[in-house]
Image (cartoon, rainbow, N blue to C red):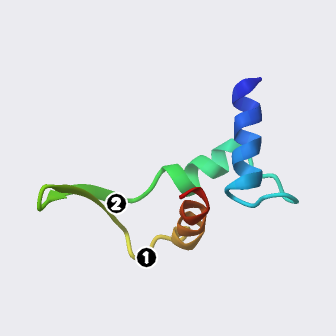
Amino acid sequence: MLGYNLMNTFKEEVLNHNRAKAMICTIRERLFLIPGKLVHTARRWVLKLEATWAYREEYEQALARVG
């Protein structure tokens, strides 16, 4: 029940999905299965995302709401 409530809070607060509720599989495919690679350069880790990724804008908006 805690996981369910956390996911619903995440969808409402971070993703701004108040009306249309996306299923967990859809959210996982769009936001957590990111095409990219993690590289280490200049003593820092950098996540390089695919430039043509279809859900990039949605991901960046969610990231801005979190941080």
In the displayed structure image, the side of residue 31 where residue 21 appears, left or right = right
Tell me the residue that label 2 is attached to. Answer: 36
Amino acid under disc 2: Gly
| Number of other residues with Cα within 10 Å of mark 1, as a class: few under 14, some 14 to 19, many 20 or more | few
Question: In which quadrant of the rendered view does residue 43 lie?
Answer: bottom left
Q: CA distance from mark 1 to mark 2?
A: 11 Å
Percent of width and height locating residue 27: 63, 51
47 relative to 23, above or below: below
Percent of width and height locating residue 14: 67, 56
Q: Earlier in the sequence, mark 1 or mark 2?
A: 2
In the displayed structure image, the side of residue 26 where residue 9 appears, left or right = right
Q: Are marks 1 and 2 in contact (CB under 8 Å)?
A: no
In the displayed structure image, the side of residue 20 where residue 38 appears, left or right = left
Work out which residue is located at the far bottom of the displayed protein and give it: 52
Q: Quadrant of the N terminus?
A: top right
Question: In which quadrant of the rendered view does residue 8 lie?
Answer: top right
What is the number of the mark on residue 20? none
Residue at image location 78% in from the left, 58% down from the top:
17
Percent of width and height locating residue 47: 31, 59
Q: Secondary structure at mark 2?
A: strand
Q: Secondary structure at mark 1?
A: loop
Residue at image location 69% in from the left, 47% down from the top:
10
Amino acid under disc 1: Thr
Residue at image location 11% in from the left, 62% down from the top:
42
| Number of other residues with Cα within 10 Å of mark 2, as a class: few under 14, some 14 to 19, many 20 or more | few
Work out which residue is located at the far left of the displayed protein and give it: 42
27 relative to 36, above or below: above
Tell me the residue that label 1 is attached to. Answer: 52
Percent of width and height locating residue 49: 37, 66
